[in-house]
Amino acid sequence: MPSRFRALLTGEATYLGSSQDTPDNPLAKLASAHAAIASVMRYDDALFDRAPLLRVISRTGIGVDNIDIAAATRRGIAVCNTPDAPTISTVEHTVLLMLAALRRLTSVRRHVMAGDTVNLFDRLSGLDACGLTLGLVGLGRIGSGVARVANVLGMEVQAYDPYLESARAEERGVRAVDNLDELLGSSDVVSLHLPLSAATQNFMNRERFEQLKPGAVFINAARGGLVDEVALLAALESGHVRAAGLDVTQVEPPSPDHPLLNRDEVVLTPHIATATEQGRVRLWTAAITQAVQVLKGERPLGLVNPEVWERLRT
């Protein structure tokens, strides 16, 4: 990278939310940064005002809901994401959440911690994945990966994705479902694989939880904003939803008194699906590579706002 370019790395959570810049806080260097390797902090006009030299924001992940794309485009800032980098880790974590929820592992752990394991074998109400129907809402990279693993586990896999052709679904061992209502009402496990946007905010609301097959298991390792947590809690309390596996919540991290944390039928992890040693290397390598490409005048594959590219080249 030419010496005249400076990158701001904002992936460390300890640097976020500080009310005052200090020499130890990389946000203090915003004014001289040409590139930002972005994790979860908010990128909007308020931040851009402090970063007049910024030319590229390269996201360590797929979602760009924390970046004001329109504002970045107005200012001639390229926005990149790394759609392939998180796939393996997120697929594995999604399957982990599904199996843990099916087996009610939170309940098991609490019994063990309390020393209450007498006759636990007969009292457990876990389910095998084999033979169940998995419904995927979205069949992109991660959804397709989850489908492959689910097929190996002996599950029937179906998906609703308005952008997917039936033939392509069949190639992935998946039955394409024409409408969401059918998928929700016929799946033993439902897993979300959607981006967060204004259109998908609270996608799983009270009405959609009521459409789920009674006793269904719900999985979300995508974005917390996709789920109305009050509606999910009500569905769990009524027993309509048997269990849930979540890697994301509306507010992250969730507070210690978050009601979903206190339920035996909920497995909840704090947005760590990609937090493996290999996953972090893939994310950071891809994000940094694309930032350098932009600074060198090379168009990256993960460019989210292509309309800005001609402006950057002039």
Image (cartoon, rainbow, N blue to C red):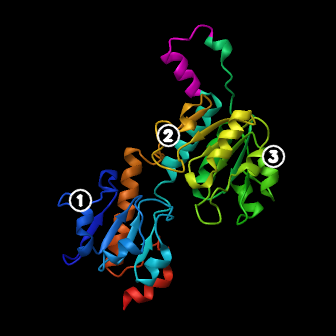
Query: Gap between marks 2 and 1, in whole Å?
Result: 28 Å
Residue annotated with mark 3: 185
The CA span between labels 3 and 1 is 50 Å
SS category of the residue bearing label 1? loop
Q: Position of residue 272 (x, y in %)?
A: 45, 45
The residue tagged 1 is 25
Residue at which label 2 appears = 269
For mark 1, does the 10 Å Cα neighbourhood hold few (<14), some (14 to 19), or many (20 or more) residues? some
Label whose residue precedes the other's in the sequence (2 or 1): 1
Is there CB contact under 8 Å for labels 3 and 2?
no
* Magenta highlight on residue 194: no
Which of the pair 44/189 is nearer the observer?
A: 44
Q: Is residue 148 visible?
A: no
Q: Which mark is first along the chain, 2 or 3? A: 3
- Percent x, y for residue 271? 48, 47
Query: Which residue is painted at 62% across and 43% down in the image?
Result: 149
Q: Provide the secondary structure element on which disc 3 rests.
A: helix
Q: Magenta segment range?
A: 105-119
Q: Based on the displayed image, in which of its 4 quarters is residue 153 positioned? A: top right
Q: Position of residue 225 (x, y in %)?
A: 58, 55
